[in-house]
Amino acid sequence: MSKIQILFLGAPGSGKGTQSEKITEEFHVVQISTGDMLREAVKNGTELGIIAKAFMDEGSLVTDDIIIKMMKERLQAIDCQKGFILDGFPRTVTQATALDTMLQTSLECCLTHVISLEVPDEPIIERLSGRRISPLTGKAYHVKFNPPAVNGMSEDGKTPLIHRDDDKSETIIKRLEVFHSQADMLKNYYKPSGKLHIVDGSKDPAAVYEDIRKILS
Ligand code: AMP
């Protein structure tokens, strides 16, 4: 199969991370999540992390210039040459146009698939408010739909799972508003390319993955 360079569009909690993980395992491409990169910067207390934290805590988007600079560097890394999945970037049309330029100049390539994972707001709120993250592996659990082996604990059975600050109710609502304010513009940006695929993300993760596999094969 030829190299795949996928972009996932979709609300926070639509399953982009879960599906990216499955694709990564099967297709051996690298997953690039701007949210994960920013959280790592916050954890390490870098200058980028300090600036980004304020935006993230209130559920707003970090400014385009910061994100574009971060992604320009990331896409130049050697691991991107075997193919990649973009999860959470671009989130604005400004970022999308910058991405096109980056791909042409650094990798001499373009996106092969743009997959929009669509889920109504109500289940998204339920997914995000119950989501818990393992600080050991980064794996996402859910208090109801995907509980860990030991209640509230990571894989070692003793490290508590994390409830992300921005997965708390008021911030979830704000993040969804921000998502909806950009979603149609982004889809319209990619529609003419013929690479945009709409996928029903409200099915169970295995069924969603089957739909995605059909698109990729
Ligand atoms: P995520 O884990 O993808 O939901 O991202 C968490 C937070 O990181 C978002 O609510 C934003 O504050 C920030 N963020 C992640 N990706 C981007 C992006 N492409 N543009 C702007 N802000 C972003």
Image (cartoon, helix red, strand yellow):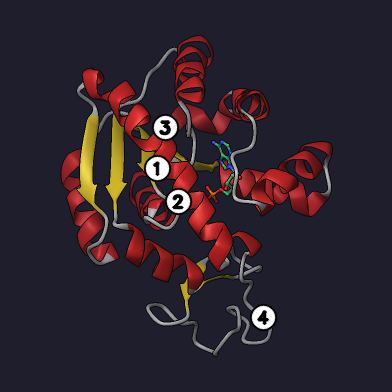
Residue 196 shows in the view? yes
**Left or right of 213, for residue 34:** right
Looking at the rendered image, the disc whose residue lies closer to the viewer, 2 or 4, is 2
Question: Where is mark 2, residue-wise?
Answer: 176
Q: Residue at x 59, y 39 (%)?
A: 61
Crowding at dot 1, Cα within 10 Å, few <14 / some 14-19 / many 20+, comes out as some
Q: Which residue is mark 1?
A: 180
Closer to the eye: label 3 or 1: 1
Q: Are marks 2 and 1 in contact (CB under 8 Å)?
A: yes
**Which residue is painted at 64% across and 44% down in the image?**
37
Q: Quadrant of the C terminus?
A: top left
Q: Residue at coordinates 64% horizontally, 30% vertically from top-left?
A: 63
Q: Residues within 10 Å of mark 3 (few under 14, many from 20)?
A: many
Q: x, y percentage for residue 24? A: 41, 48
Q: Tag 1's secondary structure?
A: helix
The amino acid pointed to by label 4 is Pro
* Contact between labelled residues 4 and 2, with CB atoms less than 8 Å apart: no
Residue under label 3, please give it: 83
Q: Which residue is mark 4?
A: 160
Quote the CA–CA distance across marks 3 and 1: 28 Å
**Residue shown at 52%/16% (left/top)?**
102
